[in-house]
């Protein structure tokens, strides 16, 4: 069927699939390197305890059938190896059916992790990766032309990501409507990057322009994704530029990078090939009938499941980053419906003194990404996801967000748990664990240009209150 394929998008598909596999690789590495402390058998929120009270039908995962830390590690590292192979082109070097199985395996492997990840995996970009990964199963490989229907489904996904984020802002915090949200956002975002201080110090009129441009990019430009070429390519280009601006201004895991990847579904691949003088190997033949049937079935499934996110977009009570099914297919997205006006950070400290006095010396634990030492410039970690650091941001907003895991976190500091300490940048007790741990809440703000020159500090912090009183392990 000639209408079934879009030969001109072969390079677009190539870029999309290889880059998507790279995002999968980062996601599996994040899981493999962090799971023991977070959800391992002795983690803060252990998988065995979770699967004991949450049935398989509510969280489909292989770990309902068996769990051990060794098995989880093999699962995550296996996913990383497969993602690396697909990134290198393995899925284009095999028959179409084998390529589809590779993509399906990546989706199933990561779904099993997300569905037992609990709070640590409660981020919109987890569902976004799974939905994009599911669509990639049906994009085909170098042996056939890209299917038109799946390219449209990827654009529909990108539209929901951008338009949903734009709507939640207009319906949410008034500062988005009066164009003042970026007076605060670069300073109060979850995990600032090395350029966030400079973005925050831009003139306020420029912040207003920034906010207005964001509204255009999220509420107007996405409509162009469904227009003929070259309008669709221009819309995709604007989205890519906008996302790169966000990449430069902060750390949002792989959210921005994955959005950039999805935008290539709207880029005219033949025009891109002409610009970069990329030659294409001709497909080996028309798409098999069984493949066309599967693509039609997947399209019908996505159309049916789109009812719920479409209704959510039109609702006055729009919800963001929500999955309507346990397989994370056709979700709703959005970010920063409200913006914090001030930044509160939980600073965790320990001491090795047995008896606490007014003169007790407390030493601060250092985190990899979240602000701590005022003189330390924030680092760039995205697309890698520092899960503990992100949850510490929520803990600073309200202790209610940390009720499940903060106590277990402190307990593991008191026992000197190696897996937990590996998540940190600095452990002030390298030879023996502390006798007491406490946490205090500080108000953080970016320094001014003058303060930076005089003190070398990027942050100014003020103690507000005790977050957790000095705590020690119970005596036996």
Image: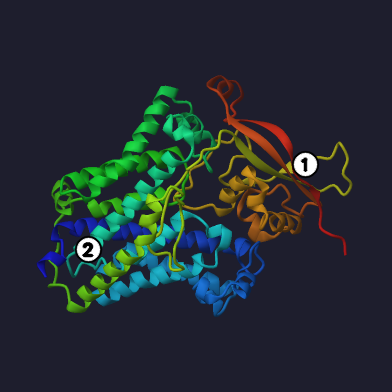
Q: Nearer the viewer, residue 385 or 70?
A: 385
Q: Which residue is mark 2?
A: 149
Q: Residue at x 58, y 43 (%)?
A: 370
**Which quadrant is the C terminus positioned in?**
bottom right
**Secondary structure of residue under mark 2:** helix
Rounded to the nearest angstrom, the CA distance separating label 2 from label 1 is 60 Å
Near mark 1 (Cα within 10 A), the count class, few <14, some 14-19 or many ≥20, is: some
* 363 left or right of 325 in image: right
Q: Position of residue 182 (x, y in %)?
A: 46, 32
Q: Residue furthest left?
A: 2
Q: Position of residue 130 (x, y in %)?
A: 40, 63
**Secondary structure of residue under mark 1:** loop
Q: Is residue 411 above or below residue 197?
A: below
* 380 left or right of 292 in image: right
Q: Position of residue 333 (x, y in %)?
A: 42, 52
Which numbered dot is residue 313?
none
């Amino acid at each position: 069927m000639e209408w079934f394929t879009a030969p001109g998008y072969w390079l677009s598909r190539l870029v999309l699939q290889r880059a998507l596999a790279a995002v999968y690789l980062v996601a599996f590495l994040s899981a493999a390197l962090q799971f023991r402390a977070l959800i391992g058998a002795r983690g803060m929120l252990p998988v065995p305890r979770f699967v004991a009270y949450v049935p398989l039908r509510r969280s489909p995962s292989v770990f309902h059938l068996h769990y051990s830390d060794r098995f989880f590690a093999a699962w995550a590292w296996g996913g990383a190896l497969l993602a690396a192979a697909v990134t290198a082109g393995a899925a284009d070097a095999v028959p179409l059916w084998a390529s589809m199985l590779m993509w399906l395996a990546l989706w199933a492997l990561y779904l099993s992790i997300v569905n037992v990840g609990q709070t640590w995996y409660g981020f919109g970009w987890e569902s976004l990766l799974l939905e994009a990964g599911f669509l990639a199963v049906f994009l085909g490989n170098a042996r056939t032309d890209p299917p038109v229907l799946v390219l449209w489904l990827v654009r529909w996904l990108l539209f929901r990501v951008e338009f949903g984020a734009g709507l939640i802002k207009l319906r949410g915090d008034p500062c988005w409507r009066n164009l003042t949200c970026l007076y605060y956002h670069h300073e109060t975002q979850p995990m600032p990057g090395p350029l966030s201080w400079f973005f925050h110090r831009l003139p306020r009129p420029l912040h207003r322009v920034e906010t207005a441009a964001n509204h255009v990019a999220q509420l107007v430009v996405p409509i162009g994704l469904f227009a003929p070429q070259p309008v669709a390519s221009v819309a995709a280009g604007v989205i890519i530029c906008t996302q790169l601006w966000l990449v430069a201004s902060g750390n949002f895991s792989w959210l921005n990078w994955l959005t950039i990847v999805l935008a290539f579904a709207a880029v005219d691949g033949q025009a891109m090939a002409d610009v970069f003088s990329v030659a294409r190997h001709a497909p080996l033949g028309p798409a098999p009938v069984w493949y066309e049937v599967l693509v039609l079935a997947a399209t019908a499934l996505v159309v049916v499941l789109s009812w719920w996110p479409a209704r959510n977009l039109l609702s006055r009570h729009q919800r963001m980053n929500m999955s309507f099914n346990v397989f994370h297919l056709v979700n709703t997205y959005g970010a920063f419906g409200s913006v914090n006006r001030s930044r509160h950070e939980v600073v965790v400290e320990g001491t090795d003194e047995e008896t606490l006095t007014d003169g007790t010396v407390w030493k601060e634990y250092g985190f990899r990404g979240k602000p701590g030492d005022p003189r330390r410039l924030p680092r760039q970690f995205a697309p890698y996801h520092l899960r503990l650091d992100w949850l510490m941001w929520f803990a600073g907003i309200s202790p209610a967000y940390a009720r499940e895991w903060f106590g277990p976190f402190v307990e593991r500091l008191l026992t000197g748990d190696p897996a937990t300490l590996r998540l940190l940048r600095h452990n002030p007790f390298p030879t023996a664990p502390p006798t007491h741990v406490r946490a205090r809440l500080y108000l953080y703000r970016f320094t001014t240009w003058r303060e930076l020159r005089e003190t070398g500090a990027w942050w100014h912090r003020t103690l507000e209150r005790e977050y957790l009183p000095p705590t020690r392990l119970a005596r036996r």
